[in-house]
């Protein structure tokens, strides 16, 4: 290995070690930390973040990257790491420290205003802080610079290189193609799912979730599951990837599919290259691809007939009183119930994309200045009525439901939909390459599926962009029609369309 590259690894390992230590502290904070630990914990995280920032912005580190940019003897992966480190550094350095401090203050103010507004169920109390947040996001986009549309600059933080043009095309298809399917479903006899809300003992749910994690290939020697208020997964290295879940005794949906969803995220992280620890080629490429992995497992696998054919007998045996008289077919239908509702995080697989589209359109217009903050609530409510035929009865069930804007997460929402669309396209290709895929799922066998994802997605880290990865894996860049084909096939059968 080239001597300068070895020197670089000292920098990148140190930065990664500090950031992963911060991740451990954050994980602990969300799972086990006693309440009184909060004050010093915040201080500990801030201290380590400061050290990481110093290391990341040191002149010695920058010089090392710059020298390696000119180095001809690097292999393609090493060379890609250097290009991406340079890209990240240039981007990070664009934001002046005054601006970063201002952004952090605006975020903290907006988050508190959002909490207050949520308590009062009143969007009015969030407006002023949201206006400031929009203004500072516009400034950020201007500092980053962009081509074509200002919102592109903000999406780049979450989905590098994504453009408004691409996302607009996808959502115009959501409107023209998915809307008629939802309308057809609404007119059909509805699915019954009352049994999902019986009492299901927590410990039994937990045990069942653990067997699913193991079955799907989550390496419990390189991870563990714990309980958290809001389920998430987090990574300290490819050999220590944690998942968390939440269990509600009166709602079987919650644990089952959040457990499978987080497992999908964790499988991606466990599949990243350990040799590339701390380097771009050892990191997830984008939130959209990350979400494709969680949604592939949650929906394409975890809500498939084949999956429940193999797993329902076990679930029924775990809860004989609750599910003894529910057939496997009825359970599968309930798992896929379509019922447009107010809250994004409770949405079904189809109406979900309208929740995302509405947020995307609102934030895009806020950022390009074509919508005023004072008109956001009306725009929100009008869109829910138009696309989902739902009246929004209160701000908490409407415009105040998500934390993202108060965190400054503008540009984030589209990645959720991208995840489902990528997942459908991956599945279509996978079925061609693993013809017995669903037969294997029926017998509880998932190793060929995981190998396909490892080979085509996980191992590459950021070596390819999302769209390149998609093209290499499936032969095409992202197309909405794969999701539509998947949806029509699945839901026509469930709703007898
Ligand atoms: Zn997710």
Image (cartoon, rainbow, N blue to C red):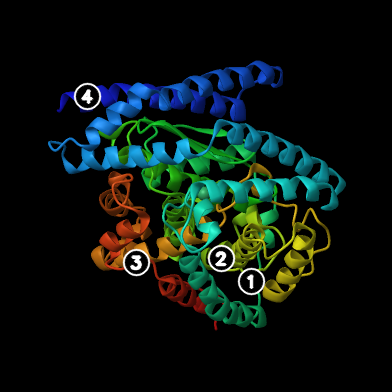
Q: Which tag is nearer the camera, tag 2 or tag 3? A: 3
Mark 1: secondary structure: loop
Q: Label 4 to label 3, Cα distance in Å?
A: 36 Å
SS under mark 2:
loop
**Disc 4 vs disc 2: Cβ atoms closer than 8 Å?**
no
Q: Nearer the viewer, residue 61 or 339?
A: 61
Q: Is residue 220 left or right of residue 150?
A: left
> Could you give the CA–CA distance between mark 2 and mark 1, rounded to whole angstroms?
9 Å
- Residue tagged 3: 477
Mark 4 / mark 2, whichever is N-terminal: 4
Is there a contact, CB below 8 Å, between mark 3 and mark 1? no
User: Local crowd at mark 1 within 10 Å, few (<14), some, or many (≥20)?
Assistant: some
Q: Position of residue 378 (x, y in %)?
A: 79, 66
On the image, numbered disc 1 is attached to which residue?
A: 191
Q: CA distance from mark 2 to mark 3?
A: 28 Å
Which of the two discs, 4 and 3, labels the residue nearer the N terminus? 4
Question: Which label was assigned to residue 6?
Answer: 4
Q: Label 2 CB, ligand 1: below 8 Å?
A: no
- On the image, numbered disc 2 is attached to which residue? 336
Which tag, 2 or 1, sits closer to the chain's start?
1
Q: Secondary structure at mark 4?
A: helix
Distance from the alpha carbon under mark 4 to that under mark 2: 51 Å
């Amino acid at each position: 290995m080239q001597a300068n590259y070895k020197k670089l690894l000292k920098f990148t390992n140190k930065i990664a070690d500090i950031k992963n230590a911060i991740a451990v502290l954050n994980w602990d904070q969300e799972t086990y930390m006693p309440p009184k630990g909060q004050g010093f914990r915040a201080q500990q995280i801030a201290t380590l973040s400061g050290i990481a920032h110093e290391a990341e912005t040191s002149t010695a580190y920058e010089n090392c990257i710059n020298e390696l940019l000119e180095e001809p003897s690097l292999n393609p992966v090493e060379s890609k790491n250097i290009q991406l480190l340079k890209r990240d550094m240039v981007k990070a350095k664009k934001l002046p420290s005054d601006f970063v401090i201002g952004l952090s203050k605006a975020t903290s103010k907006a988050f508190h205003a959002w909490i207050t507004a949520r308590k009062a169920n009143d969007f009015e109390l969030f407006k002023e802080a949201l206006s400031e947040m929009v203004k500072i996001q516009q400034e950020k986009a201007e500092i980053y610079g962009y081509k074509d549309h200002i919102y592109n600059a903000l999406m780049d933080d979450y989905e590098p290189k994504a453009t408004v043009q691409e996302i607009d095309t996808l959502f115009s298809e959501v409107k023209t193609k998915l809307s008629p399917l939802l309308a057809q479903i609404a007119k059909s006899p509805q699915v019954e799912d009352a049994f999902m809300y019986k009492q299901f003992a927590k410990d039994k749910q937990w045990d069942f979730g653990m067997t699913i994690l193991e079955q799907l290939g989550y390496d419990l020697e390189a991870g563990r599951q714990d309980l958290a208020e809001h389920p998430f997964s987090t990574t300290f290295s490819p050999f220590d990837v944690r998942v968390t879940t939440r269990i509600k005794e009166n709602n079987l949906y919650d644990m089952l599919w959040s457990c499978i969803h987080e497992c999908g995220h964790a499988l991606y992280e466990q599949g990243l290259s350990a040799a590339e620890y701390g380097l771009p080629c050892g990191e997830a490429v984008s939130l959209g691809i990350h979400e494709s992995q969680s949604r592939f497992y949650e929906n394409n696998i975890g809500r498939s007939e084949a999956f429940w054919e193999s797993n329902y007998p076990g679930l029924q045996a775990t809860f004989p009183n609750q599910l003894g008289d529910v057939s496997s077919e009825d359970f599968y239908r309930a798992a896929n119930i379509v019922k447009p509702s107010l809250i994004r995080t409770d949405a079904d697989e189809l109406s979900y994309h309208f929740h995302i589209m509405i947020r995307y359109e609102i934030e895009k217009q806020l950022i390009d200045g074509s919508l005023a903050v004072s008109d956001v609530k009306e725009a929100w409510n009008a869109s829910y009525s138009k696309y989902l035929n739902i009246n929004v009865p209160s701000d908490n069930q409407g415009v105040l439901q998500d934390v993202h804007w108060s965190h400054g997460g503008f540009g984030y929402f589209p990645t959720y939909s991208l995840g489902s669309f990528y997942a459908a396209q991956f599945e279509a290709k996978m079925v061609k390459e693993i013809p017995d895929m669903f037969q294997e799922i029926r017998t509880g066998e998932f190793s060929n599926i995981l190998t396909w994802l490892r080979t085509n997605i996980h191992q590459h880290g950021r070596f390819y962009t999302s769209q390149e990865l998609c093209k290499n894996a499936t032969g095409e860049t992202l197309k909405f029609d794969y999701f539509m084909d998947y949806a029509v096939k699945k839901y026509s059968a469930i709703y007898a369309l």
